[in-house]
Image (cartoon, helix red, strand yellow):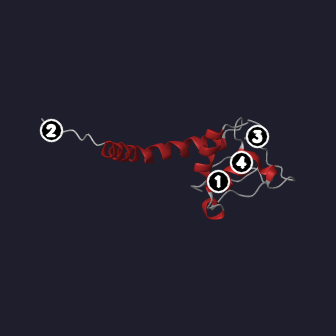
Amino acid sequence: MPAIPRKPALMFMLAMLAGLAVSPARAQSAVAEGQKLAFDRGKGNCLTCHVIKGGDLPGTIGPELKDIKSRYPDRNELFAILFDETKRNPQTMMPPFGRNRILTEQEINAIVDFLQTL
């Protein structure tokens, strides 16, 4: 009968490595969900104001959403913009999606994941 490791640290490391194997699929899922939300006219509604590659009937009020990862290398900054841009720019026309509970934090995170692929 093979010996089963009994050291907690080893078991923890094995569990962590097993979790890493699922990570890319989970990340792809978040990106797909983020795109769906960004293009959804009843939820994220990003296309009302922004041009986004692959989106139909984009608006021109906000800047084109491209090269996002290079423009916002800090993911937290991009999250904050979506959550409540009025903190950074009180004159913004961007809705405070998180503060007004238009989107959940999980939904905002998914949109950030998607935007970082543009």
Give the residue drawn at x 34%, y 46%: 9
Q: Residues within 10 Å of mark 2 (few under 14, many from 20)?
A: few
Q: Is residue 63 left or right of residue 108?
A: right
- Name which of mark 4 and mark 2 comes first in the sequence: 2
Between the residue at mark 1 and the residue at mark 3, the CA separation in whole angstroms equals 15 Å
Q: Which residue is mark 1?
A: 76
Q: Which residue is mark 2?
A: 2
Q: Which residue is mark 3?
A: 99
Q: Secondary structure at mark 1?
A: helix
Pinpoint residue 116: horizontal percent, then vertical percent.
59, 55
Q: Which residue is mark 4?
A: 82
- Could you tell me the amino acid type at mark 4? Leu
Q: Quarter holding the N terminus?
A: top left
- Name which of mark 3 and mark 4 comes first in the sequence: 4
The residue closer to the viewer here, 45 or 9, is: 9
Between the residue at mark 2 and the residue at mark 1, the CA separation in whole angstroms equals 46 Å
Q: Residues within 10 Å of mark 3 (few under 14, many from 20)?
A: some
Pinpoint residue 17: horizontal percent, then vertical percent.
36, 47
- Name which of mark 1 and mark 3 comes first in the sequence: 1
Pinpoint residue 7: horizontal percent, then vertical percent.
28, 43
Question: Seen from this angle, which residue lies furthest right?
Answer: 91
